[in-house]
Every structure is written in C-alpha cells, then in structure tokens.
Amino acid sequence: MIGGFTKRLGRELNDLKSNPAVGISVFQADDFRIWLIDIKVMDDNPIYVGKKFRLQFRFAPTYPIEAPEVQFVASYGIEIPMHPHIYSNGHICLDVLGSGWSPVQTVASVSMSIQSMLAGNDRNERPPDDARYVAHAPISPKNTRFVYHDDSV
Amino acid sequence: MDDVSDPSDWTSTSLPQLEPLDTGLRCRICRDWYTAPMITECSHSFCSLCIRKCIAATPSAEAPCCPICRASVTEVRLRRNQVLEDLCFWFRSSRMTMLEFAKAQAESSQEKKDVSGKRRRHHLVNKTESSQEDGIRRSSRMRRSVSYQEHLDLDHEQPTEDNSAANSGCFVILDDEEATNGLVPCPVCNQRMTEKQVMRHIESCLSVKSISSSSHQHSLNGTTASSTSKPPKTLLTSSSFSSKPFQRLPKLQYSLLNESKLRNKLQDLGIPAHGNKQTLQNRHTEWVSLWNANADLTSPKSKTQLLRELSEWEASLTRYALQGKKEEDLDAWAMTHKSDFQDLIAIARSSVQKKQKAEEKSSVIEAEPRKLEEVAVVEEPDEEITSLSNNFVSGVSSED
Ligand SMILES: [Zn+2]
Ligand SMILES: [Zn+2]
Ligand SMILES: [Zn+2]
C-alpha cells in the first residue's frame, strides 16, 4: 500500500475507461476528489427508459478502507431517478455505501450495484419519508444512519 | 515506487492468459503488488498494511471481517504468506522481459498472418500448393514453442547446450520428418514429445534442472539482484528473522485511557503527541498499523521513514478536512506541526547524542530493539531530517 488512495483510484480510472461496463461511463474525473459517473439502465424498465443519471463519488484519503460518499446529482437535462430508496436530494439508501462497504468494492462495482437497483425497480416513487428526510438531511449522505430498507422492492 | 504496470498490459500480447496471474499477484484492497502479504483464517491474502488498516477501521461495536468473503478475521491470527510474496517477487523480476517478449511475439505473429494471408490468396490461384499451407500452419505452431524457449533464456540468462541446440535446430527441424509427426523438443532438455506432453513435462524438467545445477541457482539470483532494487531473498538463512529490530506494538483500549495517559503513550512511542483525544487515538491507531505492517516486511524501513509516512497520512487527512477553507487555517496548521516535528527531531538528536556518550563510556554492546531504532535515525543524514519537517509543512500549504 504505497502511494495510497490516489494510486488505487488511478488504476480504477484506467479500468473504467479501458474496460467500461455497459451503461456506465465516466463523465468527469479530473482529480482524485470528486468523480461524476453517468449510468443508464440497460433493460427496458419504463421508469428509466431513455434516461441518463449522474452519480457523484467523493473520495477521502481513507478510501478504499472507508466507503466513498456517493449520491445522485441533478444537472441540465439530468434528474434524480425515481426509486423508493433514492431521496429527492440524491441520497441513496443502499447498504454497500455504508455498513455493507468493503475495500474490495470499486467505483465500477458500486455503479453496477446502483444500476441493478434501478433495473429491478417497478415503483415510480420516492421513499415514504422523503420530505422529512430532505428537510433535515446532512450535506453528506455518509452522515446519515440509514436503516436499510429490506430488499423486497 | 512508480510502478504503473497493470494486468491489462497483457491483453494485446501473445500471452493474454497471464492477465489473471498478474491480477492474482495484486492485493484486492490497494490493487498493487502484495507487500508483505498476510493470509487470513478464510485463506484470503492482503498486504499487511492494507488488512491491518482495514481491521483498525472497523467500528468497535463490530467484529472485523474479511473484505472479500466477510468471514471474521482476528489480527493476531494473520500469518505471513511467504509463498505468495516469493511468487510475486519472481513474477515481477521477470515481468518486463516476458511482457516485451509477448508484445514482440504478438506483432510478429500478426506479420505472419499477413504473409500467410497473402499466400492463401495465392493458393486460390494455384491449388496444388495446399500442402505448403499446411506447412505454414505447423511452422507457426513450432514457432510458439521455440518462443517459449527464448523466453526461458531471457528469464534465466542461462545459455545451456540444450538451448543452443534447440535454437540452432528449430527452423531446420520444421522441414524434418519429425516435424510432420507433430513432435516438438522440450525447451529445457531438448527431448522430443507432443506439444501436450511438453506442457506437463516442462515443470518437472525445470525443477530437476535447477536442483541438479547449482550454477543455475546462482544465475537465478544474479538476475534478480540486477533487475530490481530489492535484495535477493535469503529464504535459507535465518539471520534476517533473528535480527529483526521491530517488535509488534499492542493495541490500546482507548476507552480505558484518559487524554493525558494516551498522550504519554504517544510520547513514549516517539510520535507527535498534540491534539485532542480523538486525534491522538487516530494517530496511535495509524502508527500501530504502520509499525506492525513494517515488522512484516522482509527488509523493514527505518523509524524515520515510518514517521514520514505517518506525517504524510496526517497531512492528507488535514488537507481533506480543510478543503475549501481559508489559506490562514492551512498556514496555522502547518506552523503547529512544524514545531511538533522540530521537537521530535531535537529529541531524536539528543537521544542519539546520549547514546554516543554512553557508548564512549562503556564498550558493552546491547542489541536492544530500542537501540537499533536509534541507530536507524542516526543513519539518516541531518539534511533529510530537516527536509522531513519541510515536506510535512510544504505538503500541506502547497495544496489547492
Ligand atoms: Zn494491499
Ligand atoms: Zn476471506
Ligand atoms: Zn525436459
């Protein structure tokens, strides 16, 4: 572990660019602080068909021992995907981003988990506590103690 | 170590099957070559520092678990994976040669394809030469086995009579009847057999060869020493183990220590002792990981080097915490730390002086671990100690 987290991120970026997974692409990765990754849901899920979404990864020097901070961001023509585990401020309730994180996870593997979380969803709605959560949410989703919803959705 | 090599380097070569091997010799946490690999109870391996940091970062309410399979892991049950470390070392020492070779081979087989493509077009006109096309196909297969031969040569730099015989004979053999039997020579002993048999035979043949010839062993070591800066492994000598100056540091039950007791512990260890309890605790945790992982290295680094790594770690965290804050904050932070490190250097110097005086008085040589650490500090030129504190400061203020 010499060179620390930037070296590992360099390798990940190389992988992401040279060997991209279907529907996952790097929109911006100019430094080792914040990356923007675009994802598309590949099957014909009517909720997301024809749409592109943007994930923001924020890395601390403790990466990959600790999870990156991951959320959806809105931009011109890009909205926060509708999902019962995704809040309207872009925060995502997914265990792999919190207690389920492991240092062998990568930006690519997290992006794919989120992609398949969207693909498997058939409810065009926000979490039931969306309004309350968004009103009081910390800036970083990592500071939220999510109680992970069960995976029956 | 600016190793930007990547497993994907193999994809467009003639040996793409080496990609999983290349991947397998890298730690899944840092994605780099294993450094002092440790095996867990669940039989997964990670760099010593990677897995120790991982365990140290586990919230105290949870049991540390394997990053790959989530089986529980216990730090004291980690064991060095010596075989993996050796494999990694040997692979790395010949990787560049193999890679260049496999790239060149991919290029030349591309050329060959172009040539045989031309001939094939030619054959459409002249069908009677179909047997010659067969010959071309066989010759490319022969070439593959000869190439393996060359690769062994490059690897071991051991010209044996077997090699030279195979080298000089190989393209002549193509036109022999034997070639039409589909037999190829073992690249090591030159015995003829089918290609499949060679694959099975070659491993045993190589091991017999290296045991029977001591000069072979020497040349292996020689190649290693010249191709990398790492000293050759001395697996057979126990001296490197018995003289290890680093003893493992125990973990502390931080909840049982108040701030000033913890501060004293840090001072005793010779690491910066400023900050609140949480800062002290984080720094101590990092130091224990760095220190204990260092003790797993075949050639441990000096304490000065570890102090530098500790300060780099702390600087990177502070940079991160201060992102977007004002310049003055950074300067203030740098000033605090500069004085800390100057203090440390002063302490290191005075203990060195004390030691020198003590040695003048008495000629008794003690091989205490503590003394050895001090010697490690002495060996570093003063300049370097000064630049250490400068780096520590400039590393912070030069960012953003
Ligand atoms: Zn590692
Ligand atoms: Zn495991
Ligand atoms: Zn043989």
Image: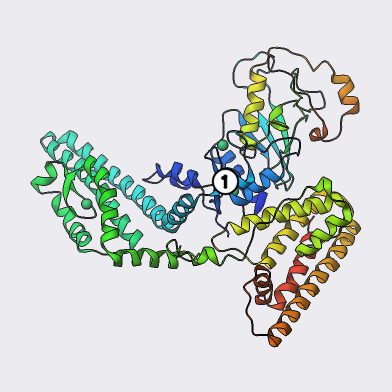
Report in which chain the residue with disc 1 lies.
B
Q: Position of residue B332 (x, y in %)?
A: 90, 61
Q: Position of residue B62 (x, y in %)?
A: 72, 35
**Tag 1, which secondary structure?**
strand
The vertical placement of A87 against B332, above or below, is above
> As rendered, which of B303 and B125 lies closer to the eye?
B303
The vertical placement of B197 against B69, above or below, is below
Q: Quadrant of residue A132?
A: top right
Q: How is the image coloured?
A: rainbow
Q: Quadrant of residue B159?
A: bottom left
Tell me which residue sits at (87%, 25%) in the image. A134
Whether ligand 1 has any atom under 8 Å from the Cβ at mark 1 is answered as yes
Callout 1: 10 Å neighbours few (<14), some, many (20+)?
many
Tell me which residue sits at (83%, 49%) in the image. B321
* Residue at the bottom extreme, as displayed: B360
> As rendered, which of B237 and B83 lies closer to the eye?
B237
Tell me which residue sits at (86%, 33%) in the image. A138
- Residue type of the residue flagged with mark 1: Phe
Q: Is residue B334 left or right of residue B311?
A: right
User: Can you say which quadrant of the picture contains the C terminus of chain B?
Assistant: bottom right
Q: Is residue B138 left or right of residue B252?
A: left
The vertical placement of A47 against B178, above or below, is above
> As rendered, which of B25 and A115 lies closer to the eye?
B25
User: Can you say which quadrant of the picture contains the N terminus of chain B?
Assistant: bottom right
Please give the residue where the numbered disc 1 appears in the rendered image.
B46
Tell me which residue sits at (19%, 57%) in the image. B166
Question: Can residue B276 be seen here?
Answer: no
| Number of callouts | 1
